[in-house]
Image (tube, rainbow, N blue to C red):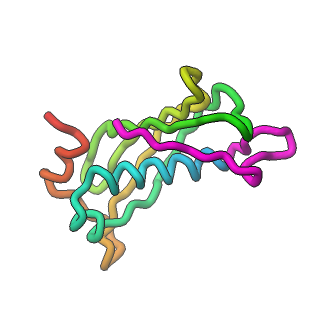
């Protein structure tokens, strides 16, 4: 698991006074990429890029400007060049949103899908 702190800024708030739904996508992107950058070796980070293929978001509670929010990211699996993550966005013990996402790993030079080396995958998914 990787914990990503989230800062809510005034631009994140919509006309209804809470965090706009589209902001959650940015948070998930920041959290998953942060997880990758923390867990993967520097040479793997330099050699690979990630693009989101799919996000499925379940909104549980609204978030507001002064809330302290974190995103907990869990790697669920790797299949070829695809990786699957769950992200739980929380305010204290309250779950604000749950996100299932699928990402594609790209070679940073060719921008083509790339499989990760087994030793890199084991950093996310130990036996």
- Total number of numbered labels? 0
Q: What residue is drawn where x is 16% and y is 57%? A: 117
| Foreground pick, 111 / 124 | 124
Would residue 57 be found to the left or right of residue 74 on screen? right
Image location (x, y in percent) of residue 23: 65, 49
Residue closest to the far top: 93
| Foreground pick, 5 / 123 | 5
Q: Which residues are magenta?
A: 1-21
Residue 116 covered by magenta stretch: no
Image location (x, y in percent) of residue 38: 32, 52
Image location (x, y in percent) of residue 123: 20, 45
Occupied quadrant, residue 124:
top left
Q: What residue is drawn where x is 36% and y is 36%? A: 74
Would residue 126 be found to the left or right of residue 28 on screen? left
Compared with residue 79, is residue 37 higher up or lower down, i.e. above or below?
below
**Quadrant occupied by the N terminus:** top left
**Quadrant occupied by the C terminus:** top left
Compared with residue 4, is residue 105 higher up or lower down, i.e. above or below?
below
Image location (x, y in percent) of residue 126: 17, 37
Q: What residue is drawn where x is 53% and y is 32%? A: 98
Residue closest to the far right: 15
Residue 13 covered by magenta stretch: yes
Occupied quadrant, residue 86:
top left
Would residue 86 be found to the left or right of residue 69 on screen? left
Residue closest to the far bottom: 109
């Amino acid at each position: 698991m990787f914990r990503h702190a989230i800062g809510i800024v005034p631009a994140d708030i919509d006309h209804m006074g809470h965090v706009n739904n589209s902001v959650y996508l940015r948070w998930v992107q920041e959290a998953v990429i942060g997880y990758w950058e923390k867990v993967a070796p520097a040479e793997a980070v330099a050699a690979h890029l990630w693009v989101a293929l799919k996000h499925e978001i379940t909104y549980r509670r609204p978030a507001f400007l002064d809330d302290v929010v974190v995103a907990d990211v869990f790697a669920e699996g790797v299949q070829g060049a695809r990786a699957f993550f769950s992200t739980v966005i929380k305010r204290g013990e309250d779950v604000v949103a749950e996100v299932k996402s699928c990402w594609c790993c790209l070679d940073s030079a060719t921008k083509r899908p790339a499989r990760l080396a087994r030793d890199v995958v084991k950093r996310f998914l130990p036996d």
